[in-house]
Image: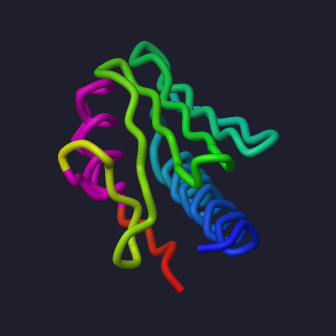
């Protein structure tokens, strides 16, 4: 993947996640907020802390920071996959969201072409 393709994919991915969080805000009364700036999406989970997604252009990765650790994801087979363990982004996001909030997350991100 060249840098232009990476930028398109990462921007699309962050936008899709942002839209999913916005939908959740409108559908629930959960203490949830987000901020997007400069390729970083910060999701504030109230007492559950934060989830931070950011682009790492030199490595062509997407990074996710959660209470349980930092995760580095590579674009493989039309999905963002962790470089350790092979977990897909949607599964990872749902897992860490649930761990941090105690609320069962069932996000489905359609960030593929």
Q: Going by the picture, which residue comes out furthest to the left?
A: 85
**Residue segment shown in magenta:** 86-107
Q: Is residue 40 left or right of residue 111?
A: right
- In this rendering, the answer to whether 25 lies above or below 29 is below
Find residue 7 and report its horizontal and vertical position in percent: 72, 64
Give the residue drawn at x 50%, y 23%.
50
| Nearer to the camera, 23 or 67 | 67
Report the residue at 46% width, 75% height from top: 110
Residue projecting furthest to the top: 47
**What's the coloring here?**
rainbow
109 above or below 62?
A: below
Q: Residue furthest right?
A: 38
Report x, y in % for residue 101: 32, 26
Asked whether residue 106 is drawn in magenta, I would say: yes
Q: Residue 26, how many percent across, how many down?
A: 57, 52
* Residue at 39% over, 18% down: 48
Point out the image quarter for the C terminus. bottom right
């Amino acid at each position: 993947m060249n840098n232009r393709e990476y930028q398109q994919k990462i921007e699309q991915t962050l936008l899709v996640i942002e839209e999913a969080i916005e939908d959740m805000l409108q559908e629930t009364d959960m203490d949830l907020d987000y901020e997007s700036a400069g390729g970083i999406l910060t999701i504030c989970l109230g007492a559950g802390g934060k989830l931070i997604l950011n682009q790492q252009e030199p490595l062509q990765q997407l990074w996710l920071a959660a209470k349980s650790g930092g995760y580095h994801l590579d674009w493989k087979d039309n999905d963002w996959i962790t470089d350790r363990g092979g977990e897909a982004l949607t599964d990872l996001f749902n897992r860490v969201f649930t761990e941090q909030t105690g609320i069962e997350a069932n996000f489905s991100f359609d960030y593929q072409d």
